[in-house]
Image: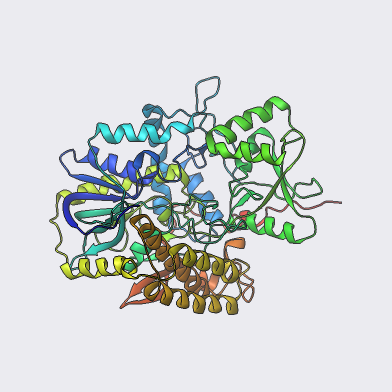
Amino acid sequence: MDEIKSGLTEVVCDVLVIGGGTAGPMAAYKAKRHSPGARVVLLEKANVKRSGAIAMGMDGLNNAVVPGYATPEQYTKEITIANDGICDQAPVYKYASRCFKIIQELDGFGIKFQKNENGDFDVKKVHHLGSYVLPMPNGDTVKKALYRQLRREKVLISNRYMATRLLTGRDGQIAGAIAVNTRNAEFLVLRAKTVILCAGAAGRLGLPQSGYLWGTYENATNSGDGYAMAYHAGAALANLECYQINPLIKDYNGPACAYVAGPFGAYTTNSEGNRFIECDYWSGQMMQEFYSELQSGKGPVFLKLNHLHSDTIGKIEAVLHQVERPSRGRFHENRGTNYRERMIEMHISEIGFCSGHSASGVYVDEFARTTVSGLYAAGDMASVPHNYMLGAFTNGAVAGEHAAEVAVNIDLADYNAADVVREQQRVLAATRREDGIPPNQLEYKTRRFVNDYLQPPKVTAKMKLGQARFAEIREDMESAMVVRDAHELMRSLEAASILDCAEMAAFASLFRTESRWGLYHHRVEYPEKNDDDWLCHSILRKRDGRMIAEKRPVAPYIVPIDESERSAYDSQRIRQHA
């Protein structure tokens, strides 16, 4: 099975895009549209036709800034407040200003969005302050429509190649990437003038309660490869202590989708049937209230739909069971849960990195540029907070256009051939052992320790113990892991990325000595928010082979935030009045 072969090929291109999910195809498409004569390569470890978090579809856009419902200024203010003030507003404002044109373009691709009787986009209110949710009745067509555009523009697609490390030139300029074939382990060196990382969230970081490696809330193929590659290339990563934690269906590890059902009249409730939060939009503070309710004696927490009319519930089921996740309906059927009769038990997901749902990502500016010259990042792994699927599309477009424009005016950077040799040795080391520990066991151990030592509420002593355990796993990974075929080789590389992300999560969490973002970074020894010392980005990077952290000031706001508005997301719990 998947016999390991030797081989090394070199490919030259102008723009290299790594990741074929949401941001990647849009980045490649826009790069090619901007510079039709450019050689644009889209690299994907699976197959672009069915890859990424939107492989089976999506129920809607969570952050659509549609004229008549919201302005870019309103959206920028909302996200700044939702992210506890730690927000470089320039990339958020640029997203908010461009996303409506992207919606129109996607609509032209054949991806239809819900419209009202007047033919206008039918935007719903779920966020705490504004209205930004736009349902997608045929969201299962997204990948097909994107793929058609890639083929039409003649973007070069390399499926089944997993990028393992980025290449940089002697002057620090990006030079390309090294990749390995996931079917036969042959190596590919891709020389590029600019590189765009679109490898998605670190969704396989914590371990789900089921213990099943692939039973994650996020797309399980997103194992933090982009975070790890950016780190090893010396790029800055921002706010990795701001974890992604979401409400999910108990034992299903899929979203409860209160934000989808909410506009129809559903809401989150405790075991007494009482609503305890005003807003079902994901934020750290909402998750803190969720966690507090679970611990209060009034848990479990439920999604309540059984007060709605049967026809209304049918509309919700059509979205959640056919577009969002087809397995969801089968799960409820096998468990005997009928939305019309019973509330749906919810719980808290494992942790991950995902700027799409929180704020942790590779640091980028309003042009999607990282701190490494010529390297860009977009989608769930870039630091634009709460950017979701539409943010991946929009910021992917920004990255693609800018990267193509830059590539036209520069030469290929030279790289050190010895870097390729060292990477081959690192990647293939486990294939040269006759016996040892398989990758899935090291992955399981890493992720179980993530739960044991890093899951909030965060305790200093536990996180330091976690660092010691991760160091032991690192030693086993480098000296005792064994790989038997090319498919398992891919799993070993994913396990290494997961371990990198676990170490970064612990390091960043220990660095920020306050509590912020609700449950996302709740430190028991530092329970209060400390704006005087910590209203800033925490930046993590690799320097001289070591992990370091430093503070970076938040850029001056484009859209002012009044002092009275700053705490809007801190006040979501419904208070009982006499």
The colour scheme applied to this rendered structure is rainbow
Q: Is residue 363 visible?
A: no
Residue occupying the far right of the picture? 578
Q: Residue at x 74, y 41 (%)?
A: 343
- Residue 302 locus on image (x, y percent): 72, 47
Asked if 434 appears above or below 47 in the picture, the reply is below
Q: Quadrant of residue 259?
A: top right
Observer-nearest of 554 and 168 = 168
Where residue 480 sits, quadrant-wise, is bottom left
Across and down, in percent, residue 104 comes to 40, 31
**Residue at image coords 56%, 56%:** 212
The answer to whether 486 is drawn above or below residue 260 in the figure is: below
Q: Is residue 161 left or right of residue 251?
A: left
Q: Residue placed at 15% from the left, 48% from the top?
A: 408
Q: How many numbered discs sit on the rendered protein?
A: 0
- Residue 204 seen in render: yes
**Percent of width and height locating residue 280:** 64, 46
70 left or right, relative to 425: right
Taking depth in this image into account, of 481 and 14 the one nearest to the observer is 481
Residue 229 lies, with reference to residue 339, above or below; the image says below
Residue 542 at what x, y percent from top left?
Answer: 35, 72
Residue 145 is left or right of residue 331, and the answer is left
